[in-house]
Every structure is written in C-alpha cells, then in structure tokens.
Image: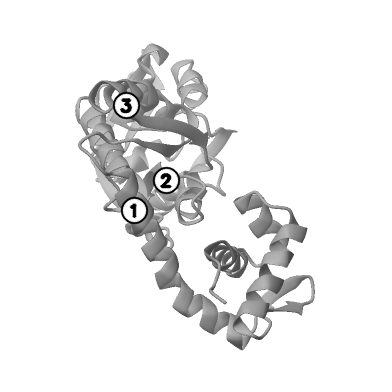
Amino acid sequence: MRVNMVHLSSLEAIARLGTVSAAADELGYTPGALSQHMDALGRTVGRPVLAKAGRFVELTDVGRIVLSEGRSMLAAERRLMDAATDVGDDIRDEIVLGTWGSTAAGLLAPVIDLVRATHPGLTIRCREVDLDEVGDAVARRRVDVSFGLTYGDAPVEQPADVVPTSLRSEQLRIAVRHDDERAGRRMRLLDFADSPWVLPPPHTVWGQAIRAACRKRGFEPIEAHELTDTAATLTLASTGLGVAPLTDLMLALSPERGVGVVRLEDDIRRDLVIYSASSHQERRGVTAIIEAVQTVVSAL
C-alpha cells in the first residue's frame, strides 16, 4: 500500500500542534476523521504512528520516522502544486494575506488595487492575525504571507521555515499634542521620563520594545493609558492625554490625527516586514504579492 499524502499531512499537523483537536481545527476536519487518518496510516506502515500521553498525543518511534521521511514528500507535493499553478505567463492563484490593526490595514487597499492592475488572475484574501503571532500563522499555513514588525529592543525568534522580507526601517519618534512646546524639537527619550504615556500593553512585542528602550535609558515610563490601536493612541496623544510612541508609517496612515512630532536623538528602530514560508519562495503568486507590497510601502 502507498502512503496517503492527506494522512501524512495530518500527521505533520498533529506533531506540530500537539493535539488531534487542534490539528483538526487547522485542517478543517473533525477530530474523529483525523483519528481515522492516523489509524489508516498506521495500517499502511504496519505499526501505530501515535500514542496517547495524558490529554495529548505523541508520535511513536515509527511515527517520527514516517514524519521525518514524509516531510520531503510534502514539500515535493507543494512544489508540484505551485509549479502547476504557475504554468503559463499569467499568474492564477489565491494568496491569503495576514494583516493586523490600523497600520497594516491602511496598506491593504493600495496593494489590492496594484495586484488587480498587474496580475488580474491573482486573488488576495485577507485574514486578520495577531501581530505577535504572524510568524506562527505563516508556519501553520493559516496565511501565505503576512505583514509583521521586528524590533531591535525586543527580538522574537520565528519558526525555522518563516523568512522576513524587509519593507521599511523606521526610527522611533514621540507624538505629543500639536501645540505642545516640544513639538518639532529634537530631544532625548530620557526627556520624557516624567511624562504620562499612552503605551501598547506590556504583553505585546511593541509594548516590550518601548519599555525596554526606556529602561536602557534609566527610567520606567509612566503608563497613563494602555492601547493597541494606532488611531486611538494618536487620538489620545493629540488631545494631550499622554505622549505616545510614533513612527513615520503610523503617521502616514493616520494623518488626520493632528499630532505634534518630536524627533529623537536616540536611534531606536523597528522594521516593517512581510513574512512568508521559505518553501513558498518560488511560488509566483507569493513573489508577486511581496513585490506589490514593496512598491506600495516605498511610495509612502
């Protein structure tokens, strides 16, 4: 009997996610159906590939061998499907693009418009993802590509198969009320040690990066308000309810907020990136989306 690729893909998902129910949710099956896949795969190779471990399941020795050898088969199948999709001059594909919050959402319309104009056979389907989990979403194939952010003051290790393409490096600035006497000046981050702040939550990477930058300069920011949304953050800053971290891209996508901008002497940066799976690097649809995003971001 030959190994069924669907069963092999199910085994890979179970090994990656740790439970049959989580793998079933990702793949769109019922847990019962996935259990049947594993039973069938076990019959094919002659021994069980899974064993119970409390509330979880784990791969047997045979299961680990099957998965180790099977990963190359799954990768070959993806390459085959990508090649078949890419036949001809026109790209005909559907790409799921991960996005988050108002910053990335502001880029969607021009990216979609550009793709429609240059690749009419290429469809973009958007899916909201948690900013701090974009790499995992790409690795689990919930999305094909996704906007993301990296921070020098709070590096995050991504799954091995996930690679970033840099779009824009931004220097941190501070948003204040438009008529604040500090607006338009160049100052140190330390000069805001006594100011109330509008900050991202401390459990977010953005929140950790800002707090880490402040601590490196000897102070703990005074947290007056805790918000994730860019537009809401800048609204509070514009009314003088607190100073807020700001980048040029945030300001470009929310110009109506009317904040004053303070440039920092400190070189504190974050990078806007787009994540994709290394196994999809030769997929023309993925490449076309990345190129479209680069074009749109470079024009801002």
Count the labels in the image: 3
C-alpha gap between disc 2 and disc 1: 8 Å
> Label 2 is placed on what type of residue?
Asp
- In the rendered structure, the answer to whether residue 155 lies left or right of residue 18 reads left
> Label 1 is placed on what type of residue?
His
Q: Secondary structure at mark 2?
A: loop
Residue 109 seen in the current view = yes
| Residue highlighted by disc 1 | 280
> Is mark 3 in CB contact (under 8 Å) with mark 2?
no
2 w.r.t. 267: above or below: below
Q: Rate crowding at label 3 as few (under 14), some (14 to 19) or many (20 or more) other CA atoms within 10 Å.
A: many
> Label 3 is placed on what type of residue?
Val
| Residue highlighted by disc 3 | 111
Query: Counting residues from the N terminus, which is met first, the one under dot 1 or under dot 3?
Result: 3
- Asked whether 279 or 258 is in front, the reply is 279
Q: Determine the image quadrant of residue 107.
A: top left
> Is mark 2 in CB contact (under 8 Å) with mark 1?
yes
222 w.r.t. 50: above or below: above
Which residue shows up at 53% across the image and 34% down it? 228
Q: Secondary structure at mark 1?
A: helix
C-alpha gap between disc 1 and disc 3: 20 Å
Q: Nearer the viewer, mark 3 or mark 2?
A: 2
Q: Determine the image quadrant of residue 33.
A: bottom right
| Residue highlighted by disc 2 | 144
Q: Secondary structure at mark 3?
A: helix
- The colour scheme applied to this rendered structure is one colour
43 w.r.t. 288: above or below: below
